[in-house]
Amino acid sequence: MALRFPKKHLDSIQAMDLEDAHTLPACMYTDEAFVQLDQGILLANSWQLVAHISQLSKPGDHVVSEVGKNPILIVRNKTGQIKGFHNVCRHRAGPIATTNGNRPQLSCRYHGWTYDLDGQLTSAPEMTTTPNFDVCQHHLPPVSLSTWQGLIFANVAKASEGIEAAAPAELSTVMAGIAETIAPVDLSSWTFSHRQEYLIQCNWKAYMDNYLEGYHLPIVHPGLNKLLDYRSYEITLAPWYSYQYSPLEDTAADKNFYGSGKAHYFCVFPNLMLNILPGRLQTNVVTPLTKNTCKVVFESYYPDINSAASQKMIAQDLAFSDEIQAEDIAICEAVQKGLASGTYESGRLNMKRENAVFHYQEIIRQSYRAAIANKLLSLDDN
C-alpha cells in the first residue's frame, strides 16, 4: 500500500527559521505512523552501510545484513567482484544465508535451492518433474552497491510494499569531503574486528539527535569529556552530513588511551555515524523498529589488527564503549518518556552547540516535503 502522510502533521515539516530554531515536534517521535514513514521515505531512499571489504577478501565470502525490512546478502564472486542480492530464495522466501561466512555456492537454508555466487539458480532438489520449471529462469534479485573508503553501501532500489522511492544521491556526493578531512587515514586498508548490537527503548530519531551534539558531554559523559577538549569542540555542516571535531587532550597515555591527535565524528543522513579516532574506526547504524524502540549496531575496525598494540586497544575500546553506550541509552530512554509524556511539544535549540541537530532535522523536513511534492506521499485527512 502507498504511504500516506497525516495532514494534521503538515505544520511539523515546514521549513524552520534559523532565528527561531526549534526541535521536531514530539509527535514525530511518538506517533506510530512515522515509523513506516521514516522507513519508507528516509531510509529506503538512502545508501545503507552493509559491510567492509575486509569481510569479503576471498571468493565465496559473504555478509548478511538488512536494509530497512529487506534481508540483504553481499558476496564476492569467483572473478573477485562484490555483488549484492536480496537474501530471499525464489522458491518460498527462505534465507539464502543466515550468518556471515564462506561458501563456494549459496544454498537456501529452507529447502536447499542452490545459487552460484552471481545469484543464478543452479539446482533445486526434486524439481525435475515439476512442469514448466527451468532453473535458468530464477535469479536472486540484485541490490545496488557502492563503496567508499572500503565501506560497502547498499540501496534497495525499489521500495517495499509498493511504496515508490526516489533515486538517492550518488554515494560520492553524500560522502564528499570526508576522505580529505581524515587524510592521511585510509579506512579501506583497515580490518573488521567486532560487532555489538543494542535494542534501545527510544525512537530512532531521539538516538540520532543525541549523537549530533556535544552539549551533553560534560553532564552525561564525564569520562569521555576528560579525553576530549570540550572548549575546542567544533561542528561543521555539509549537505548530507555534519562533522563534529575535537582535539584529544594531551595527557598521559594511561589517562587517555585514545592517544594524541583528532577525534572525528561524522553523522551521515539518515542513520549512519562514523567515529574516527587515532587507530580505530567505529561505525554506528541506527534502525527504527517501533515508535519507541530502535536497534543500534556498532562495528569496529583497526589497522594491523593482529598486533599486540591493536589487541590492547580493542580490549580498552570495548570496555570504554560499554560505559559510553550505557550512558547514552539511559538518557535517550529518559528523553523518550519525556517526549511521550504529553507535557512537551517542541523545544528551542542552542545554535552554538546544537546546529547539527537543526541541520539534521531540516533534512528530515525537506525530505518529507519533497516526497509530497513528487507524489511519493499522499495526504491523509485522518
Image (tube, grey):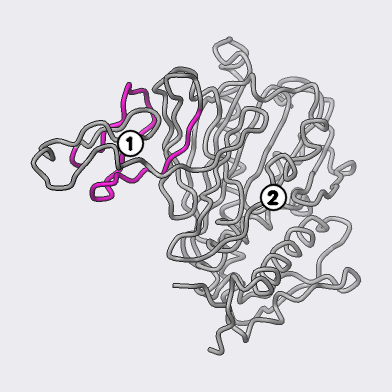
Q: Position of residue 171 (x, y in %)?
A: 68, 42
- Residue at (70%, 72%) from the top-left corner? 369
Residue 97: mark: 1
As drawn, 99 above or below 48: above
Q: Which of these two is toward me, 130 or 77?
A: 130
- Residue at (54%, 22%) from the top-left corner? 54
In the shown orientation, is residue 36 left or right of residue 109?
right
Helix, strand, or loop for circle 1?
A: loop
Q: Which residues are magenta?
A: 82-111
- Residue at (14%, 35%) from the top-left corner? 125
Q: Quadrant of the N terminus?
A: bottom left
As drawn, 5 above or below 45: below
Does the magenta portion include 260? no
Does the magenta portion include 89? yes
Q: Amino acid at mark 2?
A: Ala
- Residue at (82%, 30%) from the top-left corner? 180
Q: Which of these two is toward me, 71 or 83?
A: 83
In the shown orientation, is residue 70 left or right of residue 231?
left
Q: Which residue is mark 2?
A: 169
Q: Amino acid at mark 1?
A: Ala
The outermost residue toward the top is 307
In the shown orientation, is residue 274 left or right of residue 226?
left
As drawn, 367 above or below 223: below
Q: Position of residue 335 (x, y in %)?
A: 62, 65
* Mark 1 Cα-neighbour bin, 10 Å: few <14, some 14–19, many ≥20: many
Q: Position of residue 342 (x, y in %)?
A: 60, 82
Q: Position of residue 281 (x, y in %)?
A: 65, 30
| Nearer the camera: disc 2 or disc 1 | 2
- For the residues labelled 2 and 1, the Cα–Cα distance comes to 30 Å
Helix, strand, or loop for circle 2?
A: loop
